[in-house]
């Protein structure tokens, strides 16, 4: 699996470099563009893990829509031509970053990293066959059967945010 | 070897010609290739390169042919002659155009962000060429049979939006910025009906792979999904920034919009991406709604010809639309997307989902299978429904024209008198 290793390290190196660029660059527009690169490398990792549906959705939602919203927000910011201005939010930013890192580390420690094919019992090789033949099908089954409540709750949340946005911009 | 390329005709021919051996007897029939054993990887790369060479050059040659066809046809529509100097009927005109663009000076404005400015044409063309990877040109003539092909097309073409934003921002030009802002607002809005219009096709075909969609079309989906086809066609012409949706380059308002500052080869690449984009969009329309390479007869042997004929039909339709409709205002464009296309797309999804559940699962002997007769029944329901809902929502979005009252009493038109006459 030499080829996959090469692709992985390439994606990882580009992703980490771009992520560092997002934080370190003074030019806020270039930082936003590098964020798009980070999103695309993450999509590449999904493809490498044979999760092609999640990968394409990553491109569609993150690279195609969320990054556009971020750039839109940048353009409506004052003094954006002078680059990334210093402000007094360093301490809250550090706190949020540390919190996020803790959560990520906790998830990382908690996850069962064994391959699906190494799992014992009925979750073994049979599941690999079913899950990887068509990930869209497996995802849909999980979303609409095991996690139907969370799925519906997400829909309600989206509806609430749409109504909120509409009430904010409504003409009086 | 990846499972994808195995089916491709060109790939198999080149691969077996170069690197056939006993180890891949299943694919090549055991015949020896030109390269010695152990060099299958070289044959693999050469064959992959051959396909990509054909695809990329085909797309760009197609774009050149499209430039000629569009200029000639637009001239016909406008009672002109069009380019007719070089070659018979002026067919060599695109070469002249390209040579002119190649020898022009390639200017980068002093205040521009050089990196982003240079990347824009590259990203635009790359996004377009990526989307061609899943298009089946004939039976087993495609680069990849992705099982999420339909979603892949939309995802890859959404990258163009970022390129337009980069062009607008990095040019350091207010007209480029206006064009980009208008364009991005439009593109985000039209992406939603565009994705939703494809759901009906995916539901009926039971798969998002373009190859399966073609195979599922025992009758063309344009009859079963008239609303879906209409919304996809209108949505994709907005994504392609063609008149009536060309507010982001609107040459009579904001010079050339987002590519105002581009010249020379960069301008040529942006144009090539737009032109080949029309071809790709026509190809997707032909594949998703007109049955792709399948035809009433000889669809195995003549598949590519069927595909080209259907593609040509949609290309003609795109040029016809461009010649017919005037440019819309930004508020009209937004109202059209949100008040007309989006509700129609939702109606289409709801109706199609019920039909697919009824014919494919509730009534069917084999779950998920919809027969030709059932498709015809669905068409008989969907075509009148499409007409009624278009009429209903067209009435809702029709603009009420208010004639503004004259602002200055003194400037009222001078009444014509008998003496003047």
Image (spheres, coloured by chain):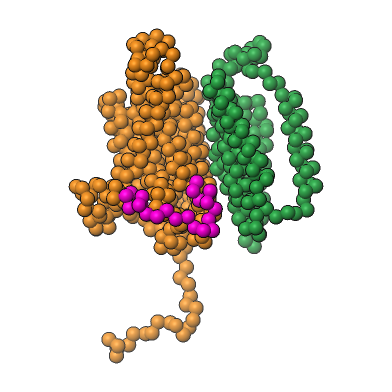
Would residue B182 appear left or right of A141 to someone viewing this image?
A: left
Magenta-drawn segment: B98-119
B236 is higher (above) or lower (below) than B172 = above
Residue A172 point in image, percent of width and height: 64, 62
Q: Quadrant of residue B22?
A: top left
> Where on the picture, by quarter, is residue B316?
top left
Give percent across and percent down for residue B383: 39, 40
Q: Is residue B173 above or below residue A141?
A: below
Residue at the (41%, 63%) spot, across then down:
B252
- The hue of chain A in the figure is green
Give the residue at x 64% y 33%.
A151
Q: Residue at x 34, y 16 (%)?
A: B34
Numbered disc total: 0
* Residue closest to the eye, A122 or B85: B85
Question: Magenta stretch: residue B183 in it?
Answer: no
Q: Nearer the viewer, residue A20 or B346?
A: A20
Q: Which residue is at the front of the view, B53 or B421?
A: B53
Q: Quadrant of the C terminus of chain B?
A: bottom left
- Is residue A30 or residue B287 the one in the foreground? A30
Q: Residue B114 magenta-drawn?
A: yes
Q: Is A127 left, or right, of B70 in this rendering?
A: right
Any part of residue B234 in sight = no
Give the residue displayed 34% in from the left and 85% down from the top.
B416
Tell me, by letter, which chain the rendering colours orange.
B
Image location of residue B207, percent across then percent down: 47, 28
């Amino acid at each position: 699996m030499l080829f996959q290793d090469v692709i992985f390290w390439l994606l990882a190196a580009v992703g980490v470099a771009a992520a560092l660029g997002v934080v370190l660059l003074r030019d806020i527009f270039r930082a936003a563009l590098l964020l798009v690169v980070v999103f695309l490398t993450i999509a590449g990792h999904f493809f490498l893990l044979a999760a092609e549906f999640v990968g394409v959705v990553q491109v569609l939602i993150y690279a195609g829509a969320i990054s556009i919203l971020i750039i839109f927000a940048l353009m409506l910011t004052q003094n954006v031509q002078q680059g990334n201005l210093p402000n007094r939010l360093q301490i809250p930013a550090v706190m949020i970053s540390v919190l996020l890192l803790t959560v990520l580390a906790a998830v990382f420690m908690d996850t069962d990293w064994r391959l699906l094919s190494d799992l014992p019992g009925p979750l073994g090789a049979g599941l690999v066959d079913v899950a990887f033949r068509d990930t869209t099908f497996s995802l849909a089954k999980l979303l609409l059967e095991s996690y139907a409540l969370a799925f519906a709750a997400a829909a309600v949340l989206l509806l609430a945010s749409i109504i909120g946005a509409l009430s904010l911009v409504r003409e009086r | 070897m990846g499972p994808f390329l195995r089916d491709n005709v060109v790939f198999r021919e080149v691969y077996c010609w170069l690197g056939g051996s006993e180890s891949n007897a299943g694919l090549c029939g055991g015949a020896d290739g030109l390269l010695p054993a152990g060099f299958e990887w070289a044959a693999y790369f050469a064959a992959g390169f051959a396909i990509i060479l054909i695809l990329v050059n085909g797309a760009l040659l197609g774009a050149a042919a499209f430039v000629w066809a569009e200029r000639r046809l637009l001239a016909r529509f406008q009672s002109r002659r069009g380019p007719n100097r070089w070659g018979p009927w002026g067919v060599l005109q695109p070469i002249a155009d390209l040579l002119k663009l190649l020898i022009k000076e390639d200017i980068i404005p002093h205040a521009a962000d050089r990196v982003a400015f240079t990347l824009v044409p590259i990203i635009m063309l790359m996004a377009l060429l990526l989307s061609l990877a899943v298009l089946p040109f004939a039976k087993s003539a495609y680069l990849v049979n992705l099982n999420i092909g339909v979603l892949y097309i939309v995802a890859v073409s959404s990258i163009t939006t970022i390129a337009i934003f980069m062009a607008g921002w990095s040019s350091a030009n207010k007209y480029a910025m206006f064009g980009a802002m208008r364009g991005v607002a439009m593109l985000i809005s039209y992406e939603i009906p565009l994705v939703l219009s494809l759901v009906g096709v995916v539901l009926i075909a039971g798969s998002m792979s373009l190859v399966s969609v073609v195979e599922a079309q025992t009758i063309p989906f344009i009859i079963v999904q008239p609303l879906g086809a209409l919304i996809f066609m209108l949505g994709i012409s907005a994504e392609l920034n063609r008149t009536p949706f060309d507010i982001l380059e609107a040459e009579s308002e904001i010079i050339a919009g987002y590519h105002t500052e581009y010249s020379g080869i960069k301008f040529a690449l942006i144009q090539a991406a737009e032109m080949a984009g029309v071809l790709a969009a026509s190809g997707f329309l032909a594949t998703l709604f007109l049955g792709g390479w399948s035809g009433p007869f000889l669809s195995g042997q003549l598949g590519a010809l069927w595909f080209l004929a259907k593609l040509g039909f949609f290309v003609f339709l795109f040029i016809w639309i461009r010649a017919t409709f005037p440019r819309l205002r930004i508020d009209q464009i937004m109202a059209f997307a949100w008040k007309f296309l989006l509700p129609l797309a939702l109606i289409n999804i709801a109706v199609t989902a019920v039909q697919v559940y009824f014919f494919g699962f509730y009534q069917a002997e084999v779950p998920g299978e919809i027969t030709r007769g059932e498709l015809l029944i669905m068409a008989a329901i969907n075509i009148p429904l499409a007409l009624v809902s278009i009429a209903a929502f067209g009435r809702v979005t029709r603009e009420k024209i208010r004639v503004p009252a004259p602002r200055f009493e003194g400037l009222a038109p001078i009444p014509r008198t008998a003496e003047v006459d």
